[in-house]
Image (spheres, helix red, strand yellow):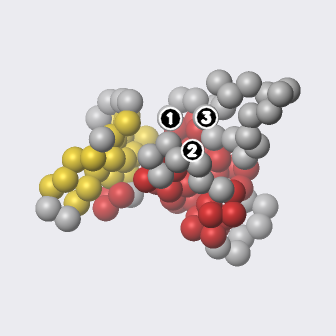
């Protein structure tokens, strides 16, 4: 759900509100500590509205030319929303369940 106030947009999901203009994530109205790349990753995924976002697209948007930083930020973003398994770089397959 989006909430518009002028040019400022907040993105709400479950018990969280993502405030891109302030680069802030709130859980139940309280700030969640989140690093810059983890914030950018979470923002990219929330903006996609449950659509698949490729690893290449995330790398281009969040990491640019930084290599070897993908896993720590995905873990941080997942932990911030309380779902350690929420962000994974491999699609579900016969040996993996989707949830």
Q: Tell me if 58 is positioned left or right of 22 in this view.
A: right
Q: Do labels 2 and 1 touch, CB within 8 Å?
A: yes
- Please give left or right for residue 78 compared with residue 34 in the image: right
The residue lying furthest to the right in this view is: 95
Q: What residue is at 19 percent from the left and 53 percent from the top?
A: 4
Q: CA distance from mark 3 to mark 2?
A: 9 Å
Q: Are marks 3 and 2 in contact (CB under 8 Å)?
A: yes
Q: Quadrant of residue 28?
A: top left
Question: Alpha-carbon neighbours of circle 2 within 10 Å: few (<14), some, or many (≥20)?
Answer: many
Q: CA distance from mark 2 to mark 1?
A: 7 Å
Q: Can residue 66 be seen here?
A: yes
Using the image, tell me which numbered label, if any, was put on residue 77.
Answer: 2
Q: Which residue corresponds to the image point at 52% horizontal and 47% vertical from the top-left?
A: 51
Query: In the image, what residue occupies the spot 52% across and 38% down?
Result: 80
Pointer 3 or 1: first along the chain? 1
Residue placed under numbered mark 3 in the picture? 86
Give residue 58's position: percent from left, percent from top: 62, 60
Q: Secondary structure at mark 3?
A: loop
- Secondary structure at badge 1 equals loop
Q: Position of residue 78 (x, y in %)?
A: 59, 38
Is residue 28 positioned above or below 68 on the image? above
Rendered residue at 63%/40% (across/down): 87
User: Which mark identifies residue 81?
Assistant: 1
């Amino acid at each position: 759900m989006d909430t518009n106030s002028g040019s400022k947009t907040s993105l709400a999901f479950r018990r969280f509100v993502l405030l891109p203009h302030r680069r802030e994530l709130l859980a139940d109205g309280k700030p969640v500590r989140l690093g810059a790349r983890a914030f950018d990753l979470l923002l990219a995924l929330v903006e996609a509205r449950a659509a698949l976002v490729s690893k290449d697209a995330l790398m281009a948007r969040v990491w640019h030319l930084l290599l070897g930083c993908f896993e720590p930020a995905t873990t941080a973003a997942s932990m911030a929303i309380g779902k350690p398994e929420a962000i994974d770089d491999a699609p579900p397959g016969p040996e993996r369940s989707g949830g």
